[in-house]
Image: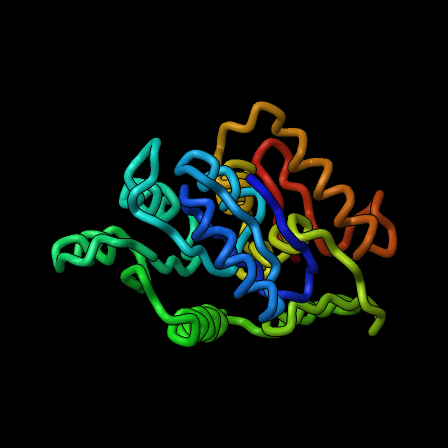
Amino acid sequence: MTVEKTTDNLPRILVVDDELAIRRFLHTVLSSEEFSLCEAKNGHAGLAAAAAFRPDVILLDLGLPDMDGIEVIKRIREWSPVPIIVLSVREHENDKVSALDAGADDYLTKPFGVGELLARIRAALRRSFLEIPEPLFISNDLKVDLGSRRVTVNECDISLTPTEYDILRFLVTHAGKVLTHSQILKQVWGTTNLEQPHVLRVNISNLRRKIESDPSRPHHIITEPGVGYRLR
């Protein structure tokens, strides 16, 4: 996995393609359009990057060296609704149908025009935004604006890491509901079997230090002993 540029305020694009020339081309195009980029050259690296980089859109080739792109789509769809745009030399109708049925959102046949690619990415980002059910969450001093990815406490902006934000976003979209450790791990990291599950506790602790007035006696993120967490 190669992260080319990361800025929290920029849309994150993951490119999964084994052709270096294609990755270089997409890097040039997308960098000029102010996207944060991550590259993966095979399916397994792409799956790992999807969990770690938390992209807003995935550009996926089907002809990967270690697994078919259809399998990559299916595995991602087990835990994430992230928009997936297939970029492939396969132009037969059954290939397109298979990719879309597996969970892809769009399909572009190589070679493709830059303008069309950027238009498809913008459309995917718009659809993703419209699917957010609760764009603004307010609880006492805490405000979470899912539309602008802005978090404030007592009207002061709070800077969160991408992982911290993803955890908070998941809690916000299920506010009042107890979320198990495995549910959060699967949503944020794409797995329920992390070798070091304490990373969730560490991130919750860091999140509490940023949004709680007294992290030792949290008011917003409540621990349900032996089960998980709940956003009050």
Colouring scheme applied when the structure was drawn: rainbow
In this rendering, the answer to whether 232 lies above or below 202 is: below
Q: Could you tell me residue 93's position as x and y percent?
A: 13, 60
Measuring 45% from the left and 72% from the top, which residue is drawn there? Answer: 118
Q: Could you tell me residue 113's position as x and y percent?
A: 37, 71
Q: Could you tell me residue 69's position as x and y percent?
A: 31, 44
* Whether residue 131 is visible: no
In this rendering, the answer to whether 184 lies above or below 96 is: above
Q: Nearer the viewer, residue 222 or 40?
A: 40
**The C terminus - image quarter:** bottom right
Q: In the picture, residue 226 is in which quadrant?
A: top right
Q: In the picture, residue 131 is in which quadrant?
A: bottom left
Measuring 70% from the left and 69% from the top, which residue is drawn there? Answer: 150
In this rendering, the answer to whether 140 lies above or below 59 is: below
Q: Nearer the viewer, residue 176 or 117?
A: 117
Measuring 24% from the left and 58% from the top, which residue is drawn there? Answer: 100
Measuring 49% from the left and 46% from the top, which residue is drawn there? Answer: 50
* Whether residue 229 is visible: yes
**The N terminus - image quarter:** top right
Q: Nearer the viewer, residue 21 or 223?
A: 21
* Residue 18 falls left or right of residue 1: left
Query: Residue farthest to the top?
Result: 195
Q: Nearer the viewer, residue 47 or 179?
A: 47
- The mark tally for this picture is 0
Q: Could you tell me residue 124's position as x and y percent?
A: 42, 69
